[in-house]
């Protein structure tokens, strides 16, 4: 299979690495966030971003009776589809000031959840913010990829779709 075919094929030869093998990624990939109930989301693979980021259009932080900080948040996992909504709930692991590519600073909640990509899954941290004006609902940052992924910037969708989403 040549590189052009690999860029177009969501089920390329590179899409099913052995357990703990390095996953080859293009500049954009399909992934899943199973603990959040998100079966499929298109992410920009962003080695310039330290932390991963997920689009939320509404967040409601709260504290449980035993003092645990949590957040309810709502996601439109598909770009340009405001009808599909996934309601999520996760523990807040941190709150950080993040500087975006335009130099703007924003305080963001940080959660930890599993990402499913290229036949593997592992926990990652991600911030929550409104990405309505961006082309991708998620950024996969370099900390989440460190030691696991090799980025091929001229390719797309090398890891294939997550198994649960293949039927979609």
Image: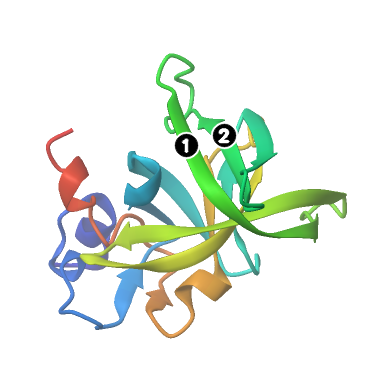
Residue 94 at x, y = what percent?
A: 70, 61
Residue, far right: 104
Can residue 11 be seen by looking at this rendering? yes
* Cα distance between the residues tagged 1 and 2: 5 Å
Query: Image check: 147 left or right of 160?
Result: right
Mark 1 is surrounded, within 10 Å at the Cα level, by few (under 14), some (14 to 19) or many (20 or more) other residues, namely some
Residue 85 position (above or below residue 48): above
Residue 73 has which mark? Answer: 2
Question: Which of 149 and 114 lies nearest the eye of the viewer?
Answer: 114
Q: Earlier in the sequence, mark 1 or mark 2?
A: 2
Residue 72 at x, y = what percent?
A: 57, 35
Residue 145 at x, y = what percent?
A: 46, 73
Residue picked out by circle 1: 88
Residue 116 has which mark? Answer: none
Mark 2 is surrounded, within 10 Å at the Cα level, by few (under 14), some (14 to 19) or many (20 or more) other residues, namely many
SS for callout 1: strand
Residue 120 position (above or below residue 5): below
Q: Residue at x 21, y 42 (%)?
A: 165
Can residue 130 be seen by looking at this rendering? no
Q: Residue at x 65, y 65 (%)?
A: 49
Q: On the image, which quarter does residue 120 sit in?
A: bottom left
Query: Image check: 23 left or right of 51?
Result: left
Q: Residue at x 50, y 40 (%)?
A: 89
Q: Residue at x 61, y 51 (%)?
A: 66
Q: How is the image coloured?
A: rainbow
Which quadrant does the N terminus fall into? Answer: bottom left
Query: Image check: 13 left or right of 113?
Result: left
């Amino acid at each position: 299979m040549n590189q052009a075919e690999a860029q177009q094929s969501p089920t390329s030869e590179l899409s099913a690495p052995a357990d703990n093998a390095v996953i080859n990624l293009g500049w954009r990939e399909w992934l899943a966030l199973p603990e959040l109930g998100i079966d499929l989301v298109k992410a920009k693979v962003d080695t310039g971003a330290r932390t991963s980021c997920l689009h939320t259009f509404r967040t409601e932080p709260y504290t449980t009776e035993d003092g645990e900080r949590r957040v309810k948040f709502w996601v439109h996992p598909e770009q340009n589809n405001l009808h599909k909504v996934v309601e999520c709930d996760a523990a807040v692991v941190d709150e950080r000031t993040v500087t975006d590519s335009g130099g703007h600073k924003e305080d963001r909640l940080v959660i930890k959840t599993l990402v499913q990509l290229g036949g593997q899954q592992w926990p990652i941290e991600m911030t929550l913010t409104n990405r309505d004006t961006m082309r991708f609902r998620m950024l996969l940052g370099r900390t989440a990829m460190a030691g696991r992924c090799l980025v091929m910037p001229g390719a797309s969708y090398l890891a294939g779709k997550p198994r649960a989403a293949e039927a979609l």
